[in-house]
Image (cartoon, rainbow, N blue to C red):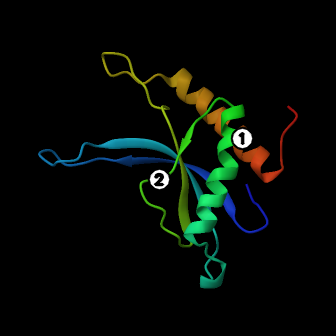
Amino acid sequence: RETENFRIYIQIENDIQIENTVDKGDIRLVVKSYWGEEPTSQPTTQTLYRVLHRLQPIAQRHGLTFSKPVRFRPGKTSTVAVVDNVFSSDPAGVLDFAKLTAALTSLEQTIDEYCGNVRTT
């Protein structure tokens, strides 16, 4: 989806770590932004905070909770938000696809509303 200043999109990030490292692997659902190739079009950290703070109440209305990324990195693409508690599994490690699908639908509605493109269907 697009706003007047940037594009916003959903991304699943899979950070697989090699065995015997300190960090565990992680998979997360994030909201990303694309600001363009021109350095003058790229955001500041303050802009990323503003986008996150505007997205959070919309996400809550759609049953989601957003967190700030560990670090905002302004650039032509930036992570704006991390969607909390999306990837859950049963004791055998089987992913709950119904929960993930519902979260993706809610996230799409959140982004549509943020961009002013709320669908009526």
Q: Nearer the viewer, residue 94 or 20?
A: 20
Crowding around mark 1 (Cα neighbors within 10 Å: few <14, some 14 to 19, many 20+) is: many
Q: Return the residue at label 1.
A: 58
Q: Return the residue at label 2.
A: 69
Crowding around mark 2 (Cα neighbors within 10 Å: few <14, some 14 to 19, many 20+) is: some
Q: Find residue 120 and report its image quarter.
A: top right
Q: Find residue 7 and report its image quarter.
A: bottom right
Dot 1 and dot 2 residues touching (CB under 8 Å): no
93 versus 11 height, above or below: above
109 versus 95 height, above or below: below
Q: Find residue 24 and report its image quarter.
A: top left
- Name the spot of residue 75 as percent of width and height, x first: 53, 72
The residue at the far right in this view is 120
> Helix, strand, or loop for circle 2?
loop
Q: Residue at x 32, y 22 (%)?
A: 93
Q: Residue at x 62, y 53 (%)?
A: 52
Is 119 situated left or right of 71 in this image? Answer: right
- Name the spot of residue 88 as percent of width and height, x first: 43, 25
The residue at the far left in this view is 20
Question: Dividing the image into 4 quarters, which one contains the C terminus?
Answer: top right
34 versus 98 height, above or below: below
Q: CA distance from mark 1 to mark 2?
A: 18 Å
* Amino acid type, callout 2: Pro
Is 51 situated left or right of 82 in this image? Answer: right
Question: Dividing the image into 4 quarters, which one contains the N terminus?
Answer: bottom right
Is 109 situated left or right of 107 in this image? Answer: right
